[in-house]
Image (cartoon, rainbow, N blue to C red):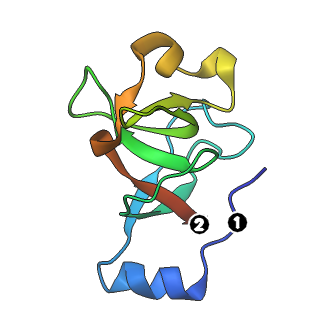
């Protein structure tokens, strides 16, 4: 399932500083997202299973990861996995991440 093109509303919110842009690096989210795609991030606390999110890497604080939420436990921790498991470092490697480490969810692709 590809991420849809960003709506005009999200593009305007990006121009107003209400959305962030993030460039995809690597193949961990193929075929949903490809290397060099640029996506818009909405900062929100309403994360659901199935959302593709930008999260802080649990061990490399300067690194952010784009992954799909596959589980949210009762303690507010999210299990994140890449759509391309052979190319992904995700919760299978680094464990679940706290909900507070989720930067936001992907709302659309701008290229």
Q: Residue 44 in the image: state x and y as whole percent.
A: 38, 63
Q: Which mark is residue 4?
A: 1
> Is the C-beta separation of discs 1 and 2 under 8 Å?
yes
Of mark 1 and mark 2, the one earlier in the sequence is 1
- Locate residue 86: give its quadrant: top right
In the image, taking residue 70 as reference, residue 4 lies left or right, namely: right
Could you say which is closer to the camera, residue 99 or residue 61?
A: 99
Q: Is residue 5 above or below residue 72?
A: below
Could you say which is closer to the camera, residue 8 or residue 69?
A: 69
In the image, taking residue 108 as reference, residue 98 lies left or right, namely: left
Question: Secondary structure under badge 1?
Answer: loop
Q: Which mark is residue 108?
A: 2
Q: Residue at x 38, y 72 (%)?
A: 19
Could you say which is closer to the camera, residue 54 or residue 35?
A: 54
Q: Which residue is most to the top? A: 93
Q: Residue at x 36, y 29 (%)?
A: 97
Q: Which residue is most to the front? A: 74
| Quadrant where the image shows the C terminus | bottom right
Q: Which residue is most to the left? A: 61
Sort mark 2 into few (<14), some (14-19) or many (20+) by Cα contacts within 10 Å.
Answer: many
Q: Residue 89 in the image: state x and y as whole percent.
A: 50, 19
Q: Residue at x 25, y 20 (%)?
A: 59
Question: Secondary structure under badge 2?
Answer: strand
Q: Residue 21 in the image: state x and y as whole percent.
A: 41, 63
């Amino acid at each position: 399932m590809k991420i849809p093109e960003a709506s005009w509303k999200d593009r305007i919110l990006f121009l107003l500083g209400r959305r962030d842009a993030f460039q995809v690096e690597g193949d961990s989210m193929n075929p949903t997202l490809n290397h060099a795609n640029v996506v818009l991030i909405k900062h929100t606390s309403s994360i659901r299973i199935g959302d593709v999110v930008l999260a802080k890497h649990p061990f490399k604080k300067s690194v952010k990861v784009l992954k799909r939420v596959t589980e949210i436990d009762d303690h507010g921790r999210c299990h994140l996995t890449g759509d391309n498991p052979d190319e992904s470092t995700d919760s299978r490697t680094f464990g679940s991440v706290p909900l507070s480490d989720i930067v936001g969810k992907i709302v659309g692709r701008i290229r």
